[in-house]
Image (cartoon, coloured by chain):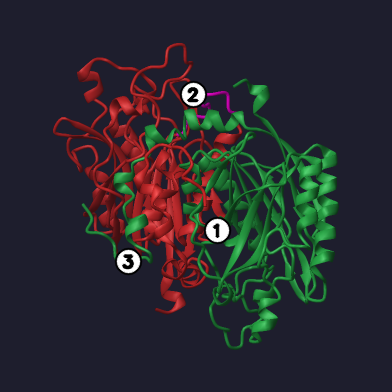
Chain colours: A red, B green
Amino acid sequence: MSRSTRKLHLAVAQLGPVQRADSRAQAVRRLLAMLEDAAARGARWLTFPELALTTFFPRWDLEDPAEIRGFFETEMPGPETQPLFDAARQRGIGFSLGYAELDGDTQYNTSILVGPDGRILGKYRKIHIPGDAQSRSGAALQHLEKKYFAVGDLGFPVWKTEDAAIGMCICNDRRWPETFRVMGLQGVDVVMLGYNTPSGYVQWNEPIHLRMHHHLLSLQAAAYQNACWVAAAAKAGIEEDSPMIGGSAIVAPTGEVMVRTFSEDDEVINFVCDLSVCDHYRANIFNFAAHRRPEHYGLIVSRTGAGAPLSAG
Amino acid sequence: MSRSTRKLHLAVAQLGPVQRADSRAQAVRRLLAMLEDAAARGARWLTFPELALTTFFPRWDLEDPAEIRGFFETEMPGPETQPLFDAARQRGIGFSLGYAELDGDTQYNTSILVGPDGRILGKYRKIHIPGDAQSRSGAALQHLEKKYFAVGDLGFPVWKTEDAAIGMCICNDRRWPETFRVMGLQGVDVVMLGYNTPSGYVQWNEPIHLRMHHHLLSLQAAAYQNACWVAAAAKAGIEEDSPMIGGSAIVAPTGEVMVRTFSEDDEVINFVCDLSVCDHYRANIFNFAAHRRPEHYGLIVSRTGAGAPLSAG
């Protein structure tokens, strides 16, 4: 494959705050406007945020089942989201979209991959669910994803499209190197991910500036160590008095942030990505077949939590 | 354990170039001077570089067995290295030291951990051996570690000392997240590592500035994602016309570089590390037991090289 055929134009649509009173139709109109913008710039694939259709409701300890149910989708596309699929087909641009999914009785934090033909290629359900299952008493902020979402049951799939091998993950997944390594071992070229990351940390008094640092560090290390591009989309800004970081970015396999958002509001960024760089790394320093040593990695799957040191040689 | 008892004073001894004509005794004198410097600053544990006793010989395709043998140690301590062990005991400072080890007929790239009492706590043998087993014809630089070193056979041990749980890795190991995760799953507090990293990349025309970026990125991600401190020591500068990066550093569990070397020559850096930060991360965002999902990590051990995507759900 010649170098010129390995260019791929990616875009990221950062979404500003979605308030509780905002309708899905309002959210979809904003997403559609950004899809049109990305398409007009010539982008081929577009990343939308996690839980892009509603406010980030895991900040609240809701009890009313009907109220909780109102944040979830039971079909995709549904009447309110169908326009996104139509626009994708009309403009020939694929996208990933995060939403809360109700499947039977089970709730997932889900992202769907839609091709430039407007058809669903596949689905990912978030595996690394952060936060708590019950409210922390006295905490200024709650982060109750473990209350609302089951652990994803679809693994970390990678889809071979005509443009690239594409995978997805969601928010907290990006902090865990296992996420990207499992996709890297399937030859992923591009990982698309959305996130809602509170600017303040709920669990200890970590300096606030570290939130952005950890976000970018995680993307950069993942892209470098797996020789892939990463396209990450925030839902950002102040939702219901709760601030969330922006910093949506497209990151190269060199571990460099090539473009990132400036605002904490609706904002599109794009970059023409050279996929041949993936090949260079995979053939050399990250030639997994030549250099990895799984016989020494057993603890990664045999232990969940940390335990005592193995008896040292 | 109170916060005040979880402080640990670390130092790193970067070594400038060691030329082929330099004797072991000369190298050890330089290491001793830096050990004295670190001890005078109050440091308790000191990291020395990889292959610290000789020049970085894997840059050459040597054929004479006696000549190759001359770069390897058959005993540790030996007559030339004993002064380091004596100084450690006298000054009450522990250290890690990298050297080429000949064990029977097998050659390893090894690092030894010596306690503040001057006794050997344990040994690590490098697992991720980079480069080639045979010369690349026409290459300006060679990197022949696969010719000279067998893959380490001791796993990634962690030693519980009275000060902290300490692990080691060597150079290219730091680019592989599996290295640190296996130690993280043993509760490692501090990872000590040495490296010799050529400033130019032998395998494709990667921009040279990325060498330092990738080095620091790998340390920062590893420290953050495993809630540990990382102390990394370069052999730096121009050895036999071959330049190597400096950038020796002590990195916090926040993923921040707290101190780093300025030069590409002999240079000591030190930092008083707060180990209680490890506890905060381990109790919250990196509570492995609460958040990891090994049932979805199987490919990390079942595959060595990258393969086709799994059938996607």
Tell which circle, 1 or 3, labels the residue nearer the N-terminal end. 1
Secondary structure at numbered mark 2:
loop
Q: Residue at x 49, y 24 (%)?
A: A203
Label 2 environment density (alpha carbons within 10 Å; few <14, some 14–19, many ≥20): some
Q: Which amino acid does label 2 sit on?
A: Val
Q: Mark 1 points at which residue?
A: B173
Which residue was labeled with disc 2? A202
Residue A3 coordinates in the image, percent (x, y)? 46, 76
Point out the stretch of residues depicted in magenta.
A197-207
Q: Main secondary structure of the magenta part?
A: loop
Q: In this view, does A7 lie to the left or right of B198?
A: left
- Taking depth in this image into account, of A144 and B115 the one nearest to the observer is B115
Viewer-closest of B287 and A68:
B287
Question: Does A60 appear above or below B73?
Answer: above
Residue type, numbered disc 3: Gly
Image quarter hosting the N terminus of chain B: top right
Q: Mark 1 lies on which chain?
A: B
